């Protein structure tokens, strides 16, 4: 299991009432300050991956040997369609970067959600690369230095293709997050709650054209700008982690 955290203080102003993300022009994007005066509390967030078993991508059988995924920051919102504009008040937040071993199905502690009383109806997150309003371009914030690192082999008959993918998923614009409006619903989580992020990277590989890769060799380093990278990065936005709350 690989787990590392790094703070994401760049471009964030800390106010006495909570964490406020402030745009360069002074516009508040996300604030953890409520008007009720309710005291904040914490509950744990963990992640689970999928077993490292072979799976089919077309006619190919793919086996992964590494699948590290950076997640964070994460913001939980009271509105059903979260965005930096609609999620004016974050009901919960995880402002670190955690690297998940997505091949480990056991629960991996990531840290704590800092929360305030209320219902969660959606979420926003970055995959370890953020674009604060004080920055001219997106920047990685965690030890992984990318959104994901995925390695493995794809086998078709007697042909074996090795691949090593370094994947970057960046916010579409300055001051935004990479993924917004994610399905994340629970009523009134409390100190006894636990948030589990379920990450299954197998679906992220299903649009990779291994036939096309095999035509140019049997060993591939996949990086931004490659068609295979675009396929994986797009799948990471359309198949995000699943948010599941539990209580003992």
Image: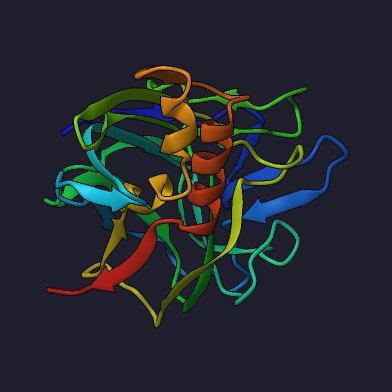
Rendering colour mode: rainbow
Camera-side residue of 47 and 105: 105
**Residue at the limit of the structure toward the bottom, as seen here:** 187
The quadrant in which the N terminus is found is top left
Task: Say which of 39 and 194 sits in front.
Answer: 194
Image check: 171 left or right of 24? Answer: left
Residue 181's place in the image compared with 234, above or below, is: below
Q: Residue at x 67, y 44 (%)?
A: 21
Judge from the rendering whether residue 201 lies leftward or rightward of residue 155; answer left or right: right
Side of 138 where 204 appears, left or right: left
* Residue at x 38% of width, y 53% of height: 203
Image quadrant occupied by the C terminus: bottom left
In the displayed image of the protein, which residue is found farthest to the right?
25
Q: Position of residue 19 (x, y in %)?
A: 57, 46
For this orientation, the residue located farthest to the front is 158
Residue 155 x, y percent position in the rendering: 24, 35
Which residue sits at x=20%, y=46%? 109
Which image quadrant is residue 100 in? Answer: top left
Question: Left or right: 121 with respect to 194?
Answer: right
Task: Between residue 147 and residue 4, name the one nearer to us.
Answer: 147
Residue 152 position, x and y percent, is 26, 30
Count of numbered circles in the view: 0
147 in relation to 34, above or below: above
Residue 5: x %, y % from top left? 34, 30
């Amino acid at each position: 299991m690989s787990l590392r955290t790094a703070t994401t203080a760049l471009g964030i102003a800390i106010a006495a009432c909570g964490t406020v993300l402030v745009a360069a022009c002074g516009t508040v994007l996300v604030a953890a300050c409520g008007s009720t005066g309710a005291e904040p509390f914490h509950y744990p967030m963990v992640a689970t991956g999928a077993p490292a078993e072979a799976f089919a991508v077309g006619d190919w059988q793919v086996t992964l040997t590494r699948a590290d995924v950076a997640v964070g920051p994460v913001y939980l919102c009271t509105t059903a369609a979260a965005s930096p504009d609609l999620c004016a008040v974050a009901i919960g937040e995880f402002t670190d970067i955690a690297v998940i071993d997505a091949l480990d199905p056991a629960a991996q502690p990531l840290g704590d959600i800092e929360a305030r009383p209320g219902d969660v109806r959606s979420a926003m997150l970055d995959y370890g690369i953020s674009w604060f309003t004080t920055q001219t371009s997106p920047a990685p914030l965690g030890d992984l230095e990318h959104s994901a690192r995925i390695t493995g082999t794809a086998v078709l008959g007697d042909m074996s293709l090795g691949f090593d993918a370094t994947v970057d998923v960046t916010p579409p614009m300055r001051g935004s997050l990479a993924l917004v409006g994610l399905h994340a619903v629970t009523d009134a989580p409390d100190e006894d709650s636990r948030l589990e992020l379920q990450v299954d990277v197998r679906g992220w590989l299903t649009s990779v054209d291994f036939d096309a890769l095999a035509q140019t060799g049997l060993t591939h380093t996949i990086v931004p700008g490659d068609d295979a990278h675009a396929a994986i990065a797009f799948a990471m936005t359309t198949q995000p982690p699943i948010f599941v709350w539990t209580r003992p």
